[in-house]
Amino acid sequence: MDAAKLRALQTPLKEGYQKAPETALIPARAEAVIDPEDISCRVSTYAGTTISGLHPAAGGDGSKACSADMLMEALAACAGVTLKAVATAMRIDLKKAKVIAAGTWDVRGTLAVDREAPVGLTDVTLRFDIDSTADPKKIKKMIALTERYCVIYQTLAHPPKLTSELNLV
């Protein structure tokens, strides 16, 4: 897709959102169905069902997806799509591009081995491997815009209010 096609696709959407801002609030949702026989759950995705389970460091056998890895996959995917859209809009030719998301979590926190150990990912890094003949300043601007407009990057950089609800059925 070129910049003109992208603009043609997005211009009417942007105009609509300017006229009716409430239509720009897009819900995101995922559902995990717990397996009654295993420490795992099924999550339906656009690409099929993912079975998530314990990481080997927490007692899993490695055959199921790790939710921390899934979060990094979501970050890499969002940044990758955003990067391509920004590159297209800026008319930057990407001969080759790769986005790598990596984070670390301390299993002692989630296993309650050490109350001082954090529970959750820390030190998340997003790396862009870019092969392009574009001016390095333009590439740096492209990366800054990718970070600015990547939904998952911004969600992690500025965490939303998080609530939990219980529904006894």
Image (spheres, rainbow, N blue to C red):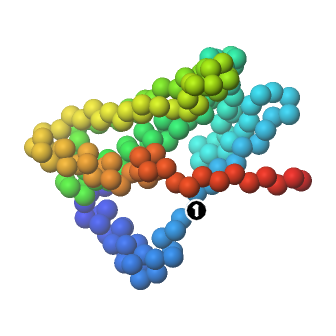
- In front here: 99 or 7? 99
Is residue 130 shown above or below 117? below
- State which quadrant residue 4 falls in: bottom left
Is residue 91 shown above or below 130? below
Residue 55 seen in the current view: no
As drawn, the residue found furthest toward the left would be 135
* Circle 1: residue type: Pro
Q: Residue at x 56, y 55 (%)?
A: 161
- State which quadrant residue 140 falls in: top left
Q: Please identify the quadrant where the N terminus is shown.
A: bottom left
Q: How busy is the neighbourhood of tag 1: few (under 14 within 10 Å), some, or many (20 plus)?
A: few
x and y, in percent, of residue 61 in the image: 68, 16
As drawn, the residue found furthest toward the bottom would be 19
**Left of 52 or right of it: where is 84?**
left
Q: Report the residue marked by disc 1.
A: 27
Residue 121 seen in the current view: yes
- In front here: 165 or 7? 165
x and y, in percent, of residue 57 in the image: 62, 17
**Left of 166 or right of it: where is 133?**
left
As drawn, the residue found furthest toward the front would be 116
**Left of 118 or right of it: where is 33?**
right
- State which quadrant residue 37 falls in: top right
Q: Residue at x 48, y 26 (%)?
A: 104
Q: Residue at x 36, y 50 (%)?
A: 82
x and y, in percent, of residue 125 in the image: 38, 33
